[in-house]
Amino acid sequence: MTDIKNLLELLTAVELLAVTGAKVAKDKEINKEDLVHIVTLAKNFELIANAVKDVDQLDEELKDLDEAELIAIVSKLFMIVKAVKAELE
């Protein structure tokens, strides 16, 4: 079993990007009201950069996932979909 820390960090960054994108796209136009969302991304740039920086370690993490790790990954993916869906409603 390996640690899935890097994968979960990447998924957290994906969630931030996806939710922010959904907020911007919600009204189907990009305008000044969307700047607050862009600022949120800028404030979290380090989180995103660190997650992407470690992407080369994902192969090792994904080689021998156990059931608990798979559940954690699927749960995180489900949370991302749910968060994006909530923003678009």
Image (cartoon, grey):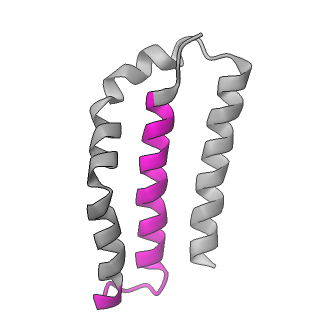
Instruction: Pick the residue in front: 22 or 13.
Output: 13
Q: In which quarter of the image is the C terminus?
A: bottom right
- Residue 49 placed where, x, y %? 27, 44
Looking at the rendering, which quadrant does residue 32 occupy? bottom left
Q: Which residue is drawn at 42% across and 67% down?
A: 20
Q: Is residue 85 shown above or below 89?
A: above
Magenta span main SS: helix
Is residue 77 found left or right of 53 in the rendered image?
right
Is residue 15 found left or right of 50 in the rendered image?
right
Q: Residue at x 30, y 71 (%)?
A: 38
Q: Which residue is drawn at 46% across and 60% down?
A: 18
Q: Is residue 52 shown above or below 18?
A: above
Q: In which quarter of the image is the N terminus?
A: top right
- Residue 80 placed where, x, y %? 58, 54
Q: What stretch is highlighted in magenta?
A: 6-33
Looking at the rendering, which quadrant does residue 81 occupy? bottom right
Q: How many labels does the image show?
A: 0
Residue 28 magenta-drawn?
Answer: yes
Q: Is residue 71 shown above or below 12?
A: above
Q: Residue at x 45, y 38 (%)?
A: 9
Residue 32 magenta-drawn?
Answer: yes
- Residue 76 placed where, x, y %? 62, 44
- Residue 55 placed where, x, y %? 34, 30
Q: Is residue 71 shown above or below 67?
A: below
